[in-house]
Image: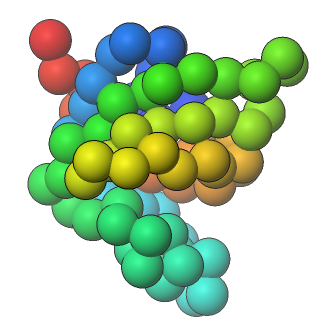
Amino acid sequence: MTLDELKPGQRGRILRIDGDGPLVQRLMALGLLEGSEIAMTRRAIGGDPLEVQIMGYALSLRREEARRVEIDLLK
C-alpha cells in the first residue's frame, strides 16, 4: 500500500520510494527513509494535502508525493 492510503491514526513502515530525480531526493531529505516509521495525522478536506508524523515532527505532503511512498501497515 502507499502512504496516501493510510487513514488518520494508522501507522506504517516505509518500504521504498518509487521513482528517481529531485522529488525523491527531496522526500528523502525530509526524512522519508526506508525502515522509518510514519503515522498519518490528518488530511485536508478532499484529502490533499495530508499531514504525517515522522521522526518526531509533522510533515505536510501532497497526495501525489505520498503516493510514491510504499509502506507496510503496522498494527
**Residue 7 left/right relative to 14:** right
Asked whether residue 27 appears in the rendered view, the answer is yes
Q: Residue at x 49, y 83 (%)?
A: 25
Asked if residue 55 is positioned above or below residue 8 in the image, the reply reads below
- Residue drawn where x is 47% and y is 45% of the image: 58
Judge by depth and name the residue closer to the eye, 45 or 12: 45
In the image: residue 51, left or right of residue 7: right
Quarter of the figure that contains the N terminus: top left
Quadrant position of the C terminus in the picture: top left
Residue 35 in the image: above or below residue 33: above
Which residue does the image show at 74% across and 38% down from the upper left? 49
Residue 40, quarter of the rendered image? top left
Displayed quadrant of residue 11: top left
Residue lying furthest right = 46
Position of residue 66 relative to residue 43, above or below, is: below
Q: Nearer the viewer, residue 51 or 6?
A: 51
Examine the rendered structure and indicate whether residue 5 appears above or below residue 70: above
Percent from the top left, x then y, of residue 41?
48, 24
Residue 62: x, y in percent?
Answer: 72, 48
Q: Is residue 63 left or right of residue 55?
A: right
